[in-house]
Amino acid sequence: MARRRVDVPDLVARARGGEPRAVARLISLVEDASPALREVMAALAPHTGRAQVVGVTGAPGVGKSTSTNALVRALRQAGRTVGVIAVDPSSPFSGGALLGDRVRMGDHADDDGVFIRSMAARGHLGGLSWSTPQAVRVLDAAGYDVVLVETVGVGQSEVEVAGLADSTMVLLAPGMGDGIQAAKAGILEVGDVYVVNKADRDGAAQVARDLRSMLALADRREGAWNPPILSTTAQSGDGVPAVVDALAEHRAWSQKTGELQRRRERRARAEVEAIAVAALRARWTQVGERDELDDLAAAVAVGESDPYAAADLLLAGIDDR
Amino acid sequence: MARRRVDVPDLVARARGGEPRAVARLISLVEDASPALREVMAALAPHTGRAQVVGVTGAPGVGKSTSTNALVRALRQAGRTVGVIAVDPSSPFSGGALLGDRVRMGDHADDDGVFIRSMAARGHLGGLSWSTPQAVRVLDAAGYDVVLVETVGVGQSEVEVAGLADSTMVLLAPGMGDGIQAAKAGILEVGDVYVVNKADRDGAAQVARDLRSMLALADRREGAWNPPILSTTAQSGDGVPAVVDALAEHRAWSQKTGELQRRRERRARAEVEAIAVAALRARWTQVGERDELDDLAAAVAVGESDPYAAADLLLAGIDDR
């Protein structure tokens, strides 16, 4: 079958006109690293920067999906349109990404103001995929007021989602034991809004108290944002409108103080760097007949060279061309 | 105070002669990215490649430290010398790295055949530090027969330690609930030897059974290593000698099949690439008066450029020089 030529300007126009299928197609082009990817990104760029990108993260079991759903509902009630990207770590094994879309769209299937998409995680451990920031650009350019990026809070992904988002919401819940213990160190630095979910369960107040005292110990500069700690029962929707308000406040604060611009520049910087490094890696492995990096690595592996000397040779190769 | 000039050849000679203080000093030079780092790595290179590097990983609570201690004891009884690098994710907050050394050396303090060193984790979430592979080179060159690298198995670090090690030992324990759930996807691909610790507790047999059926589903090529599943009670040392045997078998197998060489080349490749990329990053941020990457990122952040176009400009800048 011949590859159908992608009409990028038409797709972008239709996505901006609110056509969900065009949005979905653009995300697929991004996710599949289509040859049209560069053209897509260039066409989207002028239309980006309007959405509030909110990261939603938390350990498995805190009720992330339920909270995201409740947040979507509350945002819609407040008159905002919402795009959701759910990074699903189980998808490589369970096919969870596709199933998740269908199950979750259920609540919002008839609502044109909501677009939900699951993406596979990078590797197998919940890391954000390479294409996540680009999918965020698609939803931003398509005109969704808020873009939620939901990731499982395992390992480095809280930190990654914080790098991606304008505002990061960290979810906790009572009865998580080890999970909170392990997450402690990381979450204290990334949350703009903390939400203790399952507030109707035993121990919820204690989680909020523990969190409050940990945050009080954190070193904060003068004039820095003071992250609120809210309580919700996502299942019933209790407390969720207050989360919407807190996110709007953080947005207003970060716009006023310039923090929003700083985060977006930091994010763009990381993205540009990642793309440049990927391009260099591709060059290193495609030089002439042999793989130059493989030869250098073999010399290091047997002790004939050391990693620094080998890196010098690799870079000298680039500079010579 | 004037900086004391480091006599690298002398330090390396003394480390190879079995002097623990020289080994410790070399690791400090590596960890602090001393100006002498390149000279250290070049001096070590000819002496590396003899040690068996074993990664020890598992979720918090499975008994990693106790298992590492028991493994050190069993290896010593088998006549092998052992170097240990413990990557401690809690150290930025608790000062755990230093305390850990003292507490743990306790068992082996009078034994010249054991060297234990804790290193801070990168970030706050248990990732391997940039300098971990270089510290492994120090212990390898110093002549330890086995180098154990102990990391907390959160997020991506199982995968990272697998990249670093000749043999990876994955620890599990009964009663971990969510932890195992979250870890499932990752651990099935990285373990060369699986150890169910706390074998005296309820549920241990079930963990081993679950693991066995998950591993049976994994896709394995013809002639691939079949990872054994062993049971230990690290506290008493029960079952630990069998782990030593399994690690020796994996070593012999991977040497015979060429897997050892393949892993070492892959590891060297990643190391060389990381060093080259770090050098490029430094260049990108030190070009002339302004930070070139910052300017490009600012243009992307406001939608005047897209990440691909910006990356092209960044790389064009390198090629021109």
Image (cartoon, coloured by chain):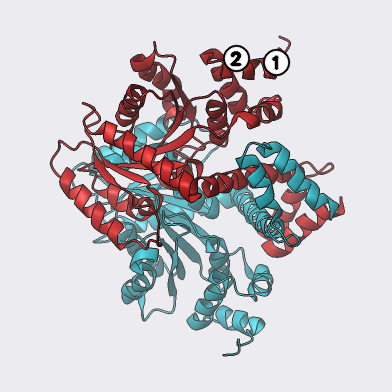
Chain colours: A cyan, B red
Question: How far apart, in angstroms, are the residues tagged by discs 1 and 2?
Answer: 11 Å
Residue A121 occupies which quadrant of the picture? bottom left
In the rendered image, the quadrant that contains the N terminus of chain B is: top right
Closer to us: A103 or A218:
A103
Q: Position of residue B315 (x, y in %)?
A: 77, 56
Residue reaching furthest to the front = B256
Residue type for callout 1: Asp
Residue type for callout 2: Arg
Residue reaching furthest to the bottom = A1
Instruction: Mark 2: give few (<14), some (14-19) or many (20+) Cα within 10 Å.
Output: some
Closer to us: B317 or B243:
B243
Residue at 36% over, 22% down: B76
Badge 1 is on which residue?
B7
Residue at 49% over, 64% down: A147
> Horizontal placement of B207 versus B73: left or right?
left
Badge 2 is on which residue?
B14
B303, above or below A200, in the image: below
B270, above or below A20, in the image: above
Instruction: Mark 1: give few (<14), some (14-19) or many (20+) Cα within 10 Å.
Output: few
Query: Chain letter of disc 1?
Result: B
Q: Is residue A79 visible?
A: yes
